[in-house]
Amino acid sequence: MAAKKSKKSSEPEEAPKLFYIFYNQERWENWLRTLKEADWEGDPDSEDMPEGFRILDGLSDDITLAVIKIIRLYQNERFTVEEARTKIADVEAIVMGEVADEEVSEIIASMQISMMVLFTAAQKYLEADYPGATEVKNLVKDGRKVVDDDPEKALEFASSIGSAVINGASCCGKYVKDTDDPTLFDEWLVEVERIADAMKSLKDFDEVGGEAA
């Protein structure tokens, strides 16, 4: 008698839950220690950016990539919306928290302000609160109009642009002004451009469980 074939379940396999460290205090402290030890003066005879500023730029990339990895995994249905919100809030609590070392706190202050648009845009996206791609140009104009008198409103516009970028809109290279005196809104647009770059570089990201960031 032929052996009976085992029945295969018609239900799709559930994606494995991830144990993935996107950002932790140790990683953050390592960056801060590196910034404190960095050379911020540079070689006066060289046109290269001083080491400290390069490291600070690398830290900004690192944080942005950590948040966008969470977004990508949410888009791949590896996280629920609540799980994604919680994980992004965890990263935000580390990055935006107070730093005891006064010298390092001053170094990262401007970066923390720039990161405000990253966290706000990510949460807006998770709430499905994002404008259409055709609205980006007008939002840039609106943000520039209000930034001096109402920075909170400017952040609202910038984070809406960021949420649109996470949802697939293009921005913001052509809107970023090459100036020695950028406004706060310009700084947020630079971070939105960083978000766009992260979305592109992580286009196929779908991490396997158990790996660390």
Image (cartoon, rainbow, N blue to C red):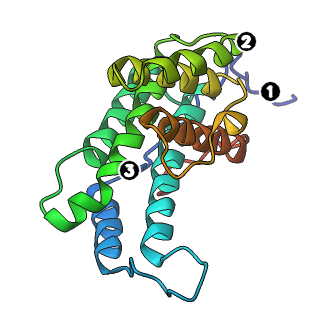
Up/down of 107 relative to 75, above or below: below
Can you give x and y, in whole percent of width and height, for residue 37 in the image?
31, 81
Up/down of 80 relative to 33, above or below: above
Up/down of 37 relative to 208, above or below: below
The residue that appears at 87% across and 29% down in the rendered structure is 2
Image-based side of 199 in relation to 82, left or right: right
The residue that appears at 29% across and 51% down in the rendered structure is 109
**Can you tell which mark lies on residue 111?**
3
Which residue corresponds to mark 2? 134
Which residue corresponds to mark 1? 5
Q: Secondary structure at mark 2?
A: helix
Nearest-to-viewer mark from 2 and 1: 2
Q: Secondary structure at mark 1?
A: loop
Amino acid on which disc 1 is placed? Lys
Amino acid on which disc 3 is placed? Met
Up/down of 66 relative to 74, above or below: below
The residue that appears at 52% across and 37% down in the rendered structure is 186
Image-based side of 56 in relation to 160, left or right: left
